Amino acid sequence: MRRSDCLDPRLKLIWCFALLLTAILSRRATTQAVVFLSAFASHLALVGNLKSYRPLTVVFLIVASQIFLMQLLFNREGSVIWHWWIVDVYSGAPAAALLGALRAVAVSVPAIQMAAWTRSEDIALMLVSWRVPYRYAMLATLAERFLPLLKEEYASVVESQMVRGAADNGIKNKIELLLATSMPFLYRAARCASEIALSMELRGFGKSDTRTFSRELHPSAAEVFCGALLIFVFCLFNFYFHI
Amino acid sequence: MSERKVLAQNNDFFRTDTKALVGSVIFGIVFVIASQATGFVDNLLPTGKAGMYLINGTCWAFLTALVALLYRQPAGVVAGEVEAITSIFYSPLWIAFVFANALGSLGVSLVAKKFSMEKWSHHILAQFVCNVLGNAVVFVGLIVIYNIPVRVALVEISIVIAFCWPCSTVLTKWAYDALKKSGLAG
C-alpha cells in the first residue's frame, strides 16, 4: 500500500484545488513552475517515483508546440524582433507562449496527481460523505471497472472492420475507419448498458435509499489540521501576497 | 405518429432509472475512447497542429447530444463529466471540458424538451446550442489556460463551430434514429 492511499481523499482534493487555482490565478511563469514542482515533490515523497507522468510528456510537448506556434505567429505585443516574408514575431510572444505552456502543465499535473493517488472506491465514499445518493456516487467505481472492458470491445470492433478490408494506414483511411467503427461500437455500448443495468437491478441495486459500505471515511485530527492549513496558505499567497 | 404524441413521449428532461445511469457511464467511456481516437487523428492533420481539433470537436458534439437524447439528464451530464475528468490525462483544457460538457448536454436537453427531435431542424437547433455553449467555454479556457490572444481564440473557435455544427448534426440524426429504431437504448 502506498503512503498516498492512507490519506483522506478530501485532503488530497484540497491540495489539488489549491495548486490548480494558484496556477489559474497567477500570471507569473515562476509561480506556474513552483506549482508543478510542488506537485512532483509531493508525489515523490508519497509514491517514490514519477511513472504516472511519463506518458504525458508527449501530450505536453504537442500542446507546448501548438501554443508556441500560435503565439509566435499571431501575438502582436511589443516590437518586432524577427521578420521573414509575411511573418512578424513580436517581443511579447515568447514570454506569453512560455507562460501558456507552463500553465498548461501546472493545471494538468495536480489533477493527474489526484487521479493517481485516489482509488475509485475512495471517490465513491467521498461523494457519499457529501450526501450524494449512492446510486450516483457508485458510478465512479463503475467507470473504472468498465473502461478496460470497453477498450477491448473497441479493439475487437476495429479488428472486425480490418478483417472486412478496412485499412488503418494514412489519415484518409484512419478517418474512414473511425466512421466504420462508430455505429457497431455504439450498438455494442447500448446493448452492454442494458445488460449491466438489468443484472444490477436483479441484484437489488437502487432498491433501498441507503447502502452500507465496508468502510467509512474518518479524517484524523492531523488531516483536518493540514486541510485547514492548506486553505489558509492558499488564501495568504493568492489574495494577500498575490504571487 | 402525431407531433403532439411524439413530443409527449420525448419531452421529459429527467430520467433516473438504472439503465440511464449505467448508460451514462458506459457512453461516457465510449466518449473517452472516441475522444482519444479522434484526437490522435486530429494531431496528424494541419488544423490539429494549429490547435483546431475539428474531428474531435465533431465527435464531442455528436456524443454529447446523443447521450442527452437517449438517456436525458442527469445521464448526459454524467457522461460528459466522465469524459472531462478522464481528459486530464490527454488535455490541459480538462477544466474547461468539465463546464463545456455539462453546458452542451443541458443545452441539448432543453431543446429536446421543447421539440420532438424527429425533424432535421430540431437536430440543427440542438447542435447549434450544443456547439456554441461548449465552444464558448473552451474559448475562455484557451485564453485563461493557454494564454492565447483573444482574437486568435475567437477565430479558432469560429472555425471549429462552422465545421463541427453541420457534421455533428448529420451524425447525431443518423445515429439517434438508428439507435432508437434498434430499441437498445429505450
Image: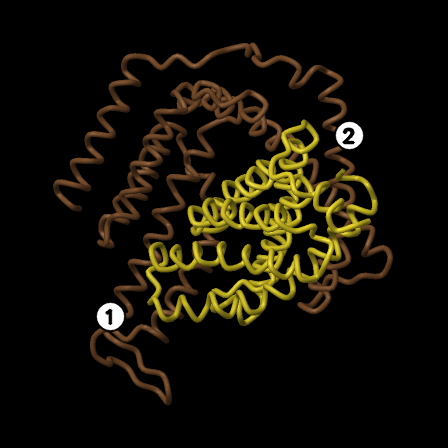
Q: Nearer the viewer, residue A224 or A48?
A: A224
The chain containing the residue under callout 1 comes to A
Whether A93 is drawn above or below B30: the answer is below
Q: CA distance from mark 1 to mark 2?
A: 57 Å
Rendered yellow, the chain in question is B
Q: Quadrant of residue B139?
A: bottom left
Q: Nearer the viewer, residue B186 or B50?
A: B186
> In the image, A226: left or right of A71?
left
* Label 1 sits on residue: A92
Q: Which mark is residue A195?
A: 2
Chain A drawing hue: brown
Amino acid at pointer 2: Glu
Q: Quadrant of residue A85?
A: bottom left
**Extreme residue in the bottom direction:** A85
Whether residue B30 appears in this view of the structure is: yes
Whether B92 is drawn above or below A45: the answer is below
> In the image, A61: left or right of A242?
right
> In the image, A112: left or right of B117?
left
The chain containing the residue under callout 2 comes to A
